Image (tube, rainbow, N blue to C red):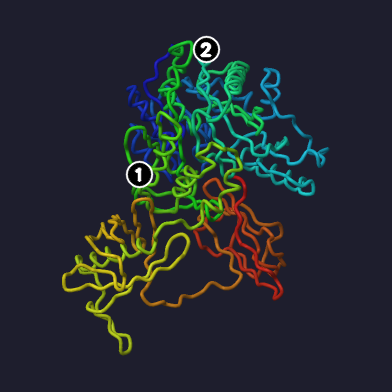
Amino acid sequence: MTTITTLLVANRGEIACRIFRTCRDLGITTVAVYSDADADALHVREADLAVRLPGAAPADTYLRGDLVVAAALAAGADAVHPGYGFLSENAAFAAAVQDAGLTWVGPPDKAIELMASKTRAKELMAGAGVPLLAPVDPDTAGPNDLPLLLKAASGGGGRGMRIVRELAVLPGELLAAAAEAASAFGDGEVFAEPYVERGRHVEVQVMADAYDTVWALGTRDCSLQRRHQKVIEEAPAPGLEDALRTRLHDAAVAAARAVGYRGAGTVEFLVSADGRPYFLEMNTRLQVEHPVTEAVFGVDLVALQLRVAEGEPLPAPAPPSASGHAVEARVYAEDPARDWQPQTGALLTLEVPDGPGLRLDTGYVGGDTIGVHYDPMLAKVIAHAPTRTEAVRLLAGALERARIHGPVTNRALLVRSLRHPDFVAARLDTGFYDRHLADLTAPGDGDPATAALAATLAEAVRATTHGTGPAPTRFGAWRNVPSQPQVKRYRSEPDGTEHEIAYRTPRTGTPEPYDAPGVRVLAATPDRVTLELDRVTRHFSLTRDRDRVYVDTAGASYTFTALPRFTDPATQTDPGSLLAPMPGTVVRLAEGLAAGVAVEAGQPLIWLEAMKMEHRILAPASGTLTALHAAPGDQVEVGALLAVVQEHLDATPVPASVPEETA
């Protein structure tokens, strides 16, 4: 037996904050590690002690096991928890922690090693009687083997993964997947297996101690995914027959016993449309979606991890009884309507309603900055209720009422997903977003014009209150004076729709819309506007940051950019200019790329990586590369000029940026 008194979390963000919360409850001193980019991050502010890892890139900081172990020793820690991601499934790191005399809050390094390679893990699971998909040799694959799924043998998160539906593209996709896997995980091994159309991603949470007790803590459905990463998860997985549920539990326990597992782990399965389960992999760590299991079973999985690491047995031979249903949604700083493009910048506001059955796990608060180096997940919102219907409704309502200001997020997509008829009816599979994304990101039934009116009235009050209104300005024979109608112009973000709002300020001092029948201003302050719209009273809350205005109202939120009242023609970018779609790092260029070379429409020219997502910058048309301003290793800001292609007159333009299926 051992007693943990000081714990270092070898991670950052939301999971570090979540582990610290349990440590505080248990009286354990907490130690954070942080990169230069995370110097003022929430997990650093919440820890009792913090140790700097010089640098910003993960490879120089959170992936440096030697630096993390040294940090633990320097801070006087006696244990290390890896969280998820980074070094959490690195057997060498687990061994190094223990070799340094520290307690490892995770499974045995041998178990990690056995499950680290998906190909070796499948061989081991076959011996344990766990159901598997038969592998396919890419060299001999034929039409009857299609579609195929190519997967990296090491790592996860969708990197090194490709779906192949045509044999002609198989060789190229194999090379691309292997190159990506080698870059991401240092291992270019790739294997192929049948791709199960409309399969469900169902997993089983296991918890094991050193005394031969293994709990199967129910199922989770994680089928709603984008780019092979989960977006919405729930427990228990709905709609499974009892026999299938039992089979999954038994297979997960068999998998844990086969590797002598200890601690928390997850066994992942693909369930076909006809109800047949197939082993995917075992994640030898805590999962992002663990809160839904905690809610349903009334346990603290981190506390159980610490208990097992200290050598204690699990508190009972069998897990506690399950109760109710829980659903989790991951809030990402990304734009689903633009190929899930990650977003960066200042997070002005992050407020999620609190109440019975709701939980927020986050690594950010309002005022923090979202950088380019790490995953764009901001928070997880979890709802627990007696039934699935109630939990889904509670979560959708909480997300709808949340106030999230700053970079574009997927919040609206989450609300629409939770209310989509297929999700409500539990018709779930991993192709959900492939089929429904266009509808889920289409303009909604909201009223941005009225929200822009509220922004205009609030700004007019603010200008009057603070004396920031513009002085009367002459343009020819026309003069804008307060007695005449004024005009404000806004652009909706991110769709770009423009709104022009006319208003006037009468002698009463309260601004009112000009020529807007059916609208009555009941109250207006710089931060809140109340309007009566066709006899219905509606409230609008406003937050502003420079030229941005954020408007929150019941059922909808809007972001506007204030535009000049008179268009000022700006210098336009030269035709054919390729601009960085996001801040990031140039990771490679097309072979032989240089000024003067000919390029074809759609040809990948530059690869840009940011926030665990890789984007290919494509030639917009066939022509000649007349300028190249990018080189591998360059850090670029959004909008930076990367290259210029002089188009041939008969060329057909194509989109200039395409994200890889990697994040």
| Disc with the residue nearer the chain's start (2 vs 1) | 2
Amino acid, disc 1: Val
Q: Which residue is mark 1?
A: 365
Q: Is residue 278 visible?
A: no
Q: Tell me if 605 is positioned left or right of 499 in this view.
A: right
The residue lying at 60 percent from left, 59 percent from top is: 657
Pick the residue in front: 115 or 334.
334
* Res. 612 image quadrant: top right
Is 651 or 296 nearer to us in this picture? 296
Crowd band around label 1 with a 10 angstrom C-alpha radius: few (<14), some (14–19), many (20+): some
> Residue 213: which numbered mark, if any?
2
What element does badge 1 sit on? loop
**Cα separation between marks 2 and 1:** 39 Å
Q: Position of residue 35 (x, y in %)?
A: 44, 42
For the point 54% across and 56% down, which residue is it?
338
- Is residue 623 rendered to the left or right of residue 612? right
State whether residue 297 appears in this view.
yes
**Residue 571 screen position, x and y as percent:** 49, 75
- Image location of residue 373, percent across then percent down: 49, 47
Q: Secondary structure at mark 2?
A: loop
Specify the amino acid type for callout 2. Answer: Thr
Q: Give the image quarter of residue 275.
A: top right
Q: Quadrant of the C terminus?
A: top right
Instruction: Provide residue 87's location: percent of width, then percent of height.
Output: 53, 32
For the N terminus, which image quadrant?
A: top left
- Which residue occupies the extreme bottom position in the image? 477
Residue in view at x 33 percent, y 24 percent: 25
